[in-house]
Structures are given as C-alpha cells and as structure tokens.
Image (spheres, rainbow, N blue to C red):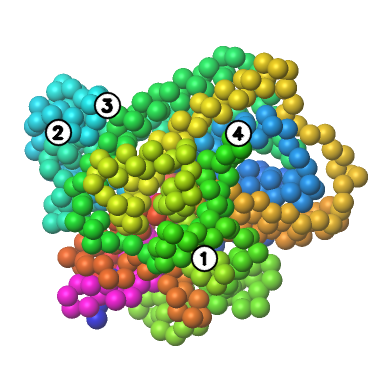
Amino acid sequence: MKKIVIDPITRIEGHLRAEVEVDDDGFVQEAYVSGQLFRGIEIILKNRDPRDAGLLAGRICGVCTNSHFRAAVSSVEDAYALKLPKNAEIIRDLMAMALFIQDHVVHFYHLHSLDFVDITSALNADAKLTSKEAHKYHKKPFRNSHSHYEAVLEKLGNFVKAGKLGPFSNGYWGHSDYKLTPEQNLIMISHYLEALKFQTNISKAVAIFGGKTPHPQSIVVGGITSVADMLNPQRLNDYLFIIKEAKDFIDRAYLPDAKLLAIAYRDEIKAGIGRANGNFMSVGGYEFDDRKLFCDGVIYNHDFKNIEDFDESKITEEIDRAWYKDEAIDNEVCYTDLNEDGSLKTAKNDDKYSWIKAPRYDGKVMETGPLARVLISYKKDNTLIKSFVDEFLKDTDLELIDLSTSVGRNGARAIETGYICEYIFKLVSRLIQNIKYYDTDTWVKFDFDKLNKNVKGRAFFEVPRGTLSHFVNIKDAKIENFSVIAPTTWNATPKNFDGVRGAYEEALVGLKIKDTSKPLEVLRVLHSFDPCLACAVHMIDAGGKELSRCKIKV
C-alpha cells in the first residue's frame, strides 16, 4: 500500500489537503481530506451588535462574500421576525444570481478546465479545423474564426518562447489521461482567456446593487441601501446589458464546452468516475410567481423516485474527528498535530485530522451543490429547469445518473447557469413593474432598542457551491453565539466516529491513478465539487519573494 499526499490542493479557494492510500495496481483504497485552515469568524462575532453580523461574516470568504453577507443578515432578520419589502428581496436575489453566473464560469474555466485541457497539445492545433470542430457543439460558436484561433496560438507560443507558460505553468501536461484533441484543447483555451474578461464584467453586475465586490455593503438588517441604483433606469439598463452579454457567452461557449467535455470523457462518465454516496440535499429557494428557482428535497442512494422534503430539524454537526474539543462549546480548538513523517493522524477512528466539522442530515453524509439542485429540481418537475436538463442529456447522449460523476458535475453546473440567466430577466421585469406602480419600498422600519433582547434566528440559502446556513443566538442585544455550515463543510466533511466517508472522500475511493507522481485523477475529482475553504486568508510578498514551495509526497 502506498500513500499519496497532495498539500495544498491548488486552484481552489483555501487550503485543502488530500491523503489517499493506493494499492499496487494504483487503485485508491482509502482517502482522507483535510481542511488546513482555522476559520474563527464565529469567535470574532461574539459580543458584537447583531446588525454588524453581515459585514463581518462576509469576510469568511473572498469569493462567496455576498452569500455569507446575506445569510448572516437574514439570520438576524429571522431572529427579530422582520418581514422584508419585496424590492429588497429582489435586489438581493439579483446580486445572488449574478454571483452564481460569475462563480460557475470562473470555476469551470479557471479552477477546473486545466484538469482536462492539455495546454501543450493545443499548440499543435490547426485553426481551420478548430473552427470546424466548434460547430459540432453550437450553430454559432463564440468568437469562432480562423484569425481568432491563430491569435490564441500566437499568445500561447509566446509563453513557451519566454521559457514559461505563465498562468498555465506547473500542470501535468502530456499526461496519458488527457483526451481532448489539439483542436478541442484550443477551443477550451480560447474560452479560458475570454472568461477572464467575462468575470470582470459580471462582477460589475454585483457591484451595481452591492456598492462594490467582493465584500458588497448594501445589505442591511431590514432591507437594502442601494435605493438610488434601483430607481435609476440607467443602472437597471447597465445590469441588463451585462447579463445579456453574459448569457451570450454561456449559450455559445460555456454550455457547448460542457457538452464537448461530456462527449470526450463519456467512458469515464459511464464508469461512474467521481461518484460519491448518492445522498443529495437542497433547501430550495428564490421564489418567483409562486414557483421556486430551486426545489427543496433530499435524495438517498441515488433513489430519484423517492425524494423527501427538506427538514432542518434533522441537521446535526459532529466534531469527533475535527480539531475541536469533544465537549466543545464556542468552537474550542483541540489541534493534535501530525505524525512524525508529516502525515495526518488517521490510524484510529477517533483520530482528528481536519478543521472542517462533520454536518449530517438525519445521521447521513450529504452532497450539496449544483448537482444536488439539478437532480432534485428536475425530478420534482420544476418547469424552470426541465428543458435545460433534457437538452443537455440529449445532446450528450447521457442519462440523469451520469451527472453524478466528476465530469457530470460540470454539466450540472453549466445547466444551472443557463436557466439562472433566464430567471434573471424575469426578476428584473418584476422589479420594474413594482417601481412602475409606485412600490419603491426597500427597508422595513424598526426600533432596535425596542426589539426582544434575547432571540435566536437562522437562515438557509442555496448559493453557488451548495447549501449555506447561518445560525445566531442573541442575548442582551449582543451576539452570544454564531454558527455557519457552509457548502464545502457538507462536501468535505471528515469521517465521524462511525468511519463513514464524506462526499470528497467517497468520490476518491476506487479511483485508478495511472501515475502516482502525477495524480491528475485526484485533482479532477476534488475540483469537480468546487471546494472553498476560508479563502479570505492568503500571504503575498510585494517584492515577489518566494514564500513557500509545494510538492506531492508519494
């Protein structure tokens, strides 16, 4: 038995470590995934004014800022039973939907695509053949011209001539598990570069109503503050223009590329590579005309015929194998250090090996995220999503179960992005109708000093990476306790005392690693979940000094 350690897992938000045990044939027999960063925001929030919760909780992450900001504020509003004006909910939803689009596109191209795209192979592509290849996945491919592809080839060539690949350095180029043709690689790299511009533009959509991004500041307890932006026709038009441009890229680049990937890696999909335990959870949400963008529900063991309604009372969070004291109150830590060889302590079923806690639903490990939302909403006959799923499955000749794989998760994420774009335009129309008929309320008036001093609240939201929940306990008008269960906490959960693996770990077991010195297969599985681990903390040196060097231990 051989152990492979990858620390840190790169191209994610935060610090994730994976240790996998492989047999002589290269098959993963056991996996341990560890969050290597202590968050601590909950401790910082203690004894604070509840109205400040959003601005502080938003600092949990440098990418999911709006999600934590809103959830924290909403948990306080729930504690005080404040009912928001419709316009405030719409503005918050518009910010959230723009974040969904940005997050999914950035994940696919900049955090995950290089697990499938071989940069060096793209250098051998023929520009004319590339243009022809792109037409297989869309009638009008995005920026599909010979001259454009030649310009991309020239840019890549310049990186190579300079002696380094710039943002494409340190990849496992030439790995035998890369399957795309040179022309398919060039299509994906072209869109990778275009997506850099895309994420800049879509960020502006969040900032229009958020004041800025990351870390928007327009959400307050009781509503929103960006009233002038809501009432300014030019600002609304700016938002719509950005979303229309985004939709064009999604329809003509992102969705076709997800289909390209699914077709090219069909064998891996059918083999179930990256499939976890088949338990999925969604809390639903984002209402529109008595319908919801996402349906709530729980699926066990890939049983799509029997979907239970979500019940928040079934959620628990364990710490048996996380670095906290077993009788912990207030997140009291209990770090146990590593073995002498630098590996995690995992030999016994009560060894602690991660800062990530272990949430459970009815005692079961759950997978949450775009895949869970798509499966649950589709099987609940959500009319907003059904046609998008049917089209994707038809074009790729796949079945619904095939989405429950590493490549399939990318398909689910692309599907979700497509139908979110449709929903946004309806949401803006609804806002305009409210304003047209003189409904301009954006904040509910309340007297904080007269509110109950001792209350509890919670908020549940579906955010880009999955189910997010915030819980607040207010005593004497101050935050006594604050707790957050983020999407990655669900997916990256360590084993509990019972030894049951989390979704990340389960998806790795049984994986065939062709070259243990280049464990590309491990990265593909983990990246498919879009991990995010307290990514607000990073170290840089303004002078360009190298601070650390990472390597894989075999």
Work out whether residue 56 or residue 26 is closer to the camera in this orientation and state it. Answer: 26
Q: Earlier in the sequence, mark 3 or mark 2?
A: 2
Q: CA distance from mark 3 to mark 1?
A: 40 Å
- Look at label 3 and name its amino acid: Phe
Q: Earlier in the sequence, mark 2 or mark 1?
A: 2
Region of the chain picked out in magenta, as a range? 5-34
Tell me if residue 533 comes above or below residue 257 in the rendering.
Answer: below
User: Quick check: marks 3 and 1 in contact, CB under 8 Å?
Assistant: no
Where is mark 2, residue-wise? 133
Where is mark 3, residue-wise? 142
Q: Earlier in the sequence, mark 4 or mark 3?
A: 3
- Please indicate whether residue 18 sits to the left or right of residue 288 in the image: left
Q: Residues within 10 Å of mark 4 (few under 14, many from 20)?
A: few
User: Element under label 4?
Assistant: loop
- Look at label 4 and name its amino acid: Asp
Q: Residues within 10 Å of mark 2 (few under 14, many from 20)?
A: some
Q: CA distance from mark 4 to mark 3?
A: 33 Å
Q: Residue 552: x and y, percent?
A: 28, 65
Where is mark 1, residue-wise? 356
Whether residue 31 is in magenta: the answer is yes
Q: Which residue reaches farthest right?
A: 450
